[in-house]
Image (cartoon, rainbow, N blue to C red):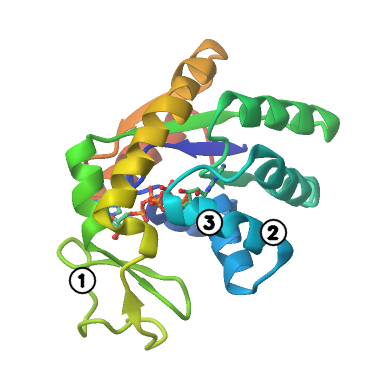
Amino acid sequence: MNIVLLGPPGAGKGTQARVLCEKFGFLHVSTGDMLREAVKNGTKIGEEAKAYMQRGELVPDEIVTTIVTGRISRVKKGTPFLLDGFPRNEAQAGELDRALEKIKKNLDMVLYLKTSPQVSIERLSGRRVCVRCGANFHTKNMPPRKESICDYCGGELVHRADDREETVKKRLTVYENETKSLIDYYRKKGILQEVSGDLDVQRLFREIKNLFSKERVG
Ligand code: AP5
């Protein structure tokens, strides 16, 4: 069972992805995480991606599809994968279809976390991430035990540069203009499932788990 998590910035894709991978054994493929890692390591891809990410724009399709298709082609037989943040437009979705066909794998479910813009904005303005291990917190919804310190590794917690108000607005516009059409794309293919991303973390996880048991996942 291979799935895609689809939803606007701040829908909680990364948060749910981590729990789902732990509980159901998916391999987590997050384009945002992979690109941030490339930027941090100063690789050629990171250098190319950096300015787009800082502006809240999509990184060019060729760069992102190369990373993702390379990654999924190396996934061991029998290991399910979960794509988080990919695809983000129809060109990427088409590339994904072709790559999957080549390696004889299917996309079984696209889980759409339908989230209101106010919720997205509130979550991103309060998000804090660990500079060392990448763990996610929120000043109100999921506060760390000690202010600005990661519960897991003691690293410093920071506000992501692209979570500043102006960049968040830009990211939401990009989502509306480029990514939202994928809802119909996957609905037509008959694999779209919708849940409310506005729910709190535990309730949302329960909804997804119920959906998975209906679809016999896990
Ligand atoms: P990426 O990192 O993928 O950003 P995004 O899609 O905008 O998603 P976010 O990571 O902001 O939000 P999320 O839905 O994962 O929410 P989270 O769980 O963290 O991409 C960054 C950039 O990389 C893009 O702008 C683009 O430039 C580039 N990029 C990436 N993929 C690309 C692609 N395919 N093509 C081209 N460019 C690409 O939660 C947010 C906050 O809310 C956290 O603080 C969390 O603690 C809290 N929270 C989470 N869930 C809940 C809940 N249910 N209730 C209450 N609080 C919650």
For label 1, the residue is 143
Q: CA distance from mark 1 to mark 3?
A: 30 Å
The residue at 56%/37% (across/down) is 3
Q: Which numbered disc, 2 or 3, marks the residue that appears first in the sequence? A: 2
Residue 218 is left or right of residue 60, and the answer is left
Instruction: Point out the tag, 1 or 3, that comes first from the N-terminus.
Output: 3
Residue count near mark 3 (Cα–Cα under 10 Å), binned few <14, some 14–19, many ≥20: few
Across and down, in percent, residue 12 comes to 34, 49
Q: Quadrant of the N terminus?
A: top right
User: Does the residue at mark 2 contact the one at mark 3 (Cβ under 8 Å)?
Assistant: no
Residue 47's place in the image compared with 196, above or below, is: below
Q: Residues within 10 Å of mark 2 (few under 14, many from 20)?
A: some
Q: Quadrant of residue 82?
A: top right
Circle 1 Cα neighbour tier, 10 Å, few/some/many (<14 / 14–19 / ≥20): some
What secondary structure is found at the residue carrying circle 2?
helix
SS type, badge 3: helix
Asked if residue 50 is positioned above or below residue 83 in the image, the reply reads below
Quadrant, the C terminus: top right
Query: Where residue 157 appears, x then y in whole percent?
Result: 33, 78
* Quarter location, residue 172: top left
Q: Earlier in the sequence, mark 2 or mark 1?
A: 2
Q: Inspect this view and state whether residue 20 appears.
A: no
Give the labeled residue for mark 3.
51
Q: Is residue 188 above or below residue 14?
A: above
What residue type is disc 1 on? Pro
The answer to whether residue 71 is visible is yes
The label number, if any, that marks residue 187 in the structure image: none
Q: Which residue is mark 2?
A: 45
CB atoms of marks 1 and 3 within 8 Å:
no
Q: Nearer the viewer, mark 1 or mark 3?
A: 3
Rounded to the nearest angstrom, the CA distance separating label 2 from label 3 is 11 Å
Residue positioned 35% across, 42% down in the render: 170
